[in-house]
Image (spheres, rainbow, N blue to C red):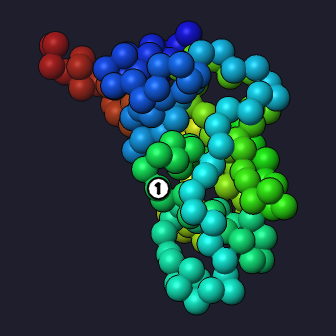
Amino acid sequence: MGPSGLVRVLVLQIMPATSSNKPYRVARSKTGLGLFATKPIKKGTRIIRYFGPILDSRIPAHDEIENKYLFELNGRWTIDGSVRKNLARYINHSCRPNAESDVRPRERKVFIRAIRNIEPGDEINYDYGTDYFKAYLKPIGCKCPSCEAKRKKLRAEARAERTKVKARTEAKAKKTGAKAGKKKLNGHAVGKKNGRARA
Ligand SMILES: [Zn+2]
């Protein structure tokens, strides 16, 4: 476990439990709140249901509802996941997720399912999809661990490049300086002057 894992475990211990028999709980994540595993979750396991009132786009009053927890099932049906009891609404987006949304339009149900083995302390996340990414995440820069790691790598590469350029520039300056120094030394009538002073 790395240092960040340790911090995560500490955070989990401080945060109040939301439900002790469930393999997850809500805890502080880098970008606000998130849903974190409290027990090992095997790949393929149905973790939690994303639920809330079903909205029908053909009903104008339904169609007017706007919040960031709307989960579109298809052109007609949408789940309004903004209800408090829907803990799945805390699950953050990731471009390299450990879970996925299993959308069942006919049943009008959505389940979040593990697509990798998830360890206690891991944040659970799924890919919100291209539309959401383009509309909400791309403009502000995606803060998911995968994108953060990518940015960190790019920053490190930029830093390494700057160091290389600096070293090259310094080496060049030294060379030029040495040449200039030699020239000065050659131009100097060292022997004569010193000889005179000593005499
Ligand atoms: Zn991302």
Name the residue: 52% across, 35% down.
35
Judging depth in this view, the residue of 5 and 35 nearest the camera is 35
Q: Is residue 66 above or below residue 106?
A: below
Count all numbered tags in the image, as a single digit: 1
Residue at the extreme bottom of the image, as rendered: 60
Relative to 3, 75 lies left or right: right
Name the residue: 39% across, 24% down.
17
> Whole-percent x and y of residue 108?
75, 59
Badge 1 amino acid:
Val
Kindly tell me whether residue 143 is visible in this rendering: no
Kindly tell me whether residue 104 is visible in this rendering: yes
State which quadrant residue 12 falls in.
top left
Name the residue: 42% across, 29% down.
18
> Whole-percent x and y of residue 16?
33, 25
| Residue corresponding to mark 1 | 83
SS at badge 1: loop
Look at the image and tell me in which quarter the N terminus lies: top right
